[in-house]
Amino acid sequence: MAGMSEVGRLFNNNELIVAEVLQSAEAMKAAVSHLERFMEKADTAARGKVILATVKGDVHDIGKNIVGVVLGCNNYEVIDLGVMVALDRILQTAVDKHADIVGLSGLITPSLDEMAQVAKEMERRRFTLPLLIGGATTSAQHTAVKIAPEYGGTTVYVPDASRVADVVSQLLNPAQRAAFGQANAQRQAELRERHRQRTHVLVPYRDARARRPTFAWDQPGIAVPCFTGRRSIDDMPLADLVPFIDWTFFFTAWELKGRFPAILDHPQYGEAARDIYDHGRALLQDAIGRQTIRAAGVYGFWPANADGDDIVLFEDASRQREILRFNMLRQQELTDQTRPLRSLADFIAPIESGVIDYIGAFAVTAGLGIEEAVRRFEEKRDDYDAIMIKALADRLAEAFAECLHARVRREWGYGAEEHLSGEDLLAEKYRGIRPAFGYPACPDHSEKGKLFDLLEAGRVGMALTETCMMTPAASVSGLYFAHPEASYFTVGRVGRDQLEDYARRKGMPTGEAERWLSPSLA
């Protein structure tokens, strides 16, 4: 434990990276496992007890797991409740285990609302424990504006594992706790005031629609796919996905910033990056050879037209039977008087044009079998490889999406002659886009329900949680647009007028639509 305290100190001083901490923890666990049988049981003086959980509706846990190992290395007792953890279980465990701190994690935007609900319930039950907030979609501003006001205790945003030990140490140190809490409260008050003073110049929704981009629509200019309907890929060879992996984001999972391959020669942590890269590739080859994880997916093309800001999908080219509508949002923030205000619906021929257009859709996963693979590593007390295999599965899922998009462009015809290098693919030097629900151009996660129904994604082992998080976690889904001018953009803030129109188009109560779109509301 003295050795691990030194590991924690070095990590907190940025002298070790996350992967090295995990490797150290793995060595410690192996040693302790061997020695425990020779030792009498005794109470150990942990520095404090921390509850960690990924909130209800969310299944992502790589960051949370890294935080747990780092806290363990700093001699804190960590009670990790896992993923999809209901509010009541989190709080009851905190009471039953006499916890000192509660830590919440989440990846998708609906998780932010769930965290606020946990904070509100902590206030109702008169908790006084500090509350830690972390995860990819969280931020200092959101914590200050949406979560901290719900709870009278100290609520702290922790951006990554490198900060968590210092934050927990100050929160649990009687000599530092009050000053840290006051400074944290002051920073959050400043963020709330800055947020309050922000102005969003929104045009009325009716005017925003009038400022849509205009395109010349004619049938000969429409790309026609070689088939319509759904096709599944029940067992995608992982080896075929490896050339499409973007390794830059693999290192991001380990909290190492820098582009691949330059990161391998980084003056500070290049050697560690090379070690992670070599180990990751070896583990990947083992997974491919043993087929410990598998990939599957489904995709297809459908005749489609835009009806206002809705994209209407039809059963066939006769357009007699409507299958479903994807409801899209439109930009309303006026940042440039000459710039059009866009919606993804703009890239599909309007129904009044009389032109038959097409849209594609997909859902892929590289996480089949991942839970069993992780369980085997955890049984060996191997946190490093347990996290590593999840990080690799995430990269394979993204690679699958890129690989499938290349196939789709060929099958749609407009990409039949493209010859792109790996660098060109990563730079997206091709025609067409594949936006995902929950991301800036279409921020409403709930539309994924329609997408999964359309694709019958359950038949390839994929599902959605109640907050529309995809399972397995190593999954990607979205739409395909073939229009030459199609590009990614951010919807930004939307006004009450568009919110009400959107709710009407979805057939959803305005309050429910407001909940799904809360991060996007002006």
Image (cartoon, rainbow, N blue to C red):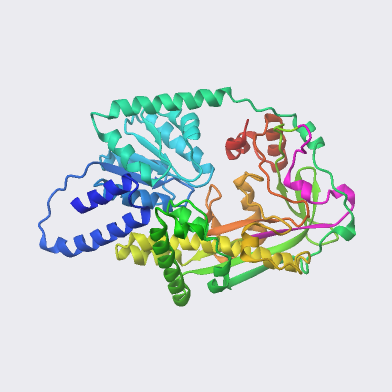
477 is higher (above) or lower (below) than 187: below
Magenta region includes residue 483? no
Q: What residue do we see at 54% from left, 47% from top? A: 467
Q: Position of residue 231 (x, y in %)?
A: 68, 68
Q: Position of residue 342 (x, y in %)?
A: 74, 41
- 273 displayed left or right of 483: left
Q: Position of residue 96 (x, y in %)?
A: 27, 42
- Given residues 232 and 172, the one toward you in this image is 172
Q: Is residue 135 visible?
A: yes
201 is higher (above) or lower (below) than 89: above
Residue 49, quarter of picture = top left
Q: What residue do we see at 47% from left, 63% from top? A: 392
The residues colored magenta run: 337-362
Q: Position of residue 74 (x, y in %)?
A: 26, 47
Q: What residue do we see at 77% from left, 31% from top? A: 337
Q: Quadrant of the C terminus?
A: top right
81 is higher (above) or lower (below) than 384: above
